[in-house]
Image: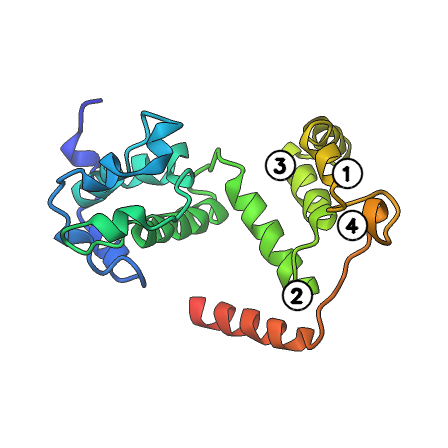
Amino acid sequence: MPIKAWELDPHFKYEIMQEPGGEHLTACYQCSTCTLGCPITEIIPSYNPRKFIQMSLLGMRKEVLTNPDLWICAICQTCTARCPQNVVVGDVLSVLRRIAEKEAEAGNITIESPRPLFEKAFLHTLEKYGRLYDMGLAMEYYPKREGSKIKGMKAMMDDYRGFGMRMFKRGKMGPLGGHGMLKGMRPSKIKQREVMEKIFEWAEEHEK
């Protein structure tokens, strides 16, 4: 893909470096150690975290923020441990994701990956109950991903037909609440849930 100089954003790298986690972006000298050691490449050979650093430095703002691969990183920190320049690649990718979400909320770009929806549903479950509530997470995530409750429920049943049954058998979730095979439909809240609420309030305040 040819790079058109007039479409580049020379301020993009500075925007990234102003965010917590993106401070050392320009220290990268493109040695590819991050990509060569990335466990994701064993599953998706085309995945290349170094590419996001390079494109960000070049100012390819739109190409970076709309790339579905931006959401693949599992933040395992293998690349960070091996980087000779101490660039925290996972944190840089997290910064890019936050910028992408803000741009999507403003209507400037479209995010194709469903991961932001999943992460929001996951955090909402933690904030509400203080712990993961599998069924509640699924009930919130699938309708948003599919665009309607009916389509969401159908997609959830299709996905759960395989691994969902294994979760039922192991007592991870069940249809009626309770214990063992019947566990999981009703949420279980932690004690002192107000502590978790304060953590989320603090995080939201410092994100502004």
Could you give the CA–CA distance between mark 2 and mark 1, rounded to whole angstroms?
25 Å
The residue at which mark 1 appears reads as: 169
Label 3: element kind: helix
Could you give the CA–CA distance between mark 2 and mark 4, rounded to whole angstroms?
15 Å
- Coloring applied to the structure: rainbow
Near mark 1 (Cα within 10 A), the count class, few <14, some 14-19 or many ≥20, is few
The residue at which mark 2 appears reads as: 130
The residue at which mark 3 appears reads as: 145
Nearer the camera: disc 4 or disc 1: 1
Q: Are marks 2 and 1 in contact (CB under 8 Å)?
A: no
Could you give the CA–CA distance between mark 4 and mark 1, rounded to whole angstroms?
12 Å
- Nearer to me, 5 or 18: 18
Direction from residue 65 to residue 83 in the image, left or right: left
Residue at image x 26%, y 62%? 18
Direction from residue 35 to residue 29 in the image, left or right: left
Can you tell which quarter of the image residue 190 is in?
Answer: bottom right
Q: Earlier in the sequence, mark 4 or mark 1?
A: 1
Near mark 4 (Cα within 10 A), the count class, few <14, some 14-19 or many ≥20, is many
Total number of numbered discs in the rendering: 4
Q: Which of marks 2 and 3 is nearer the N terminus?
A: 2
Could you give the CA–CA distance between mark 3 and mark 4, rounded to whole angstroms?
22 Å
Could you give the CA–CA distance between mark 1 and mark 3, rounded to whole angstroms?
27 Å
Callout 2 amino acid: Gly
The residue at which mark 4 appears reads as: 184
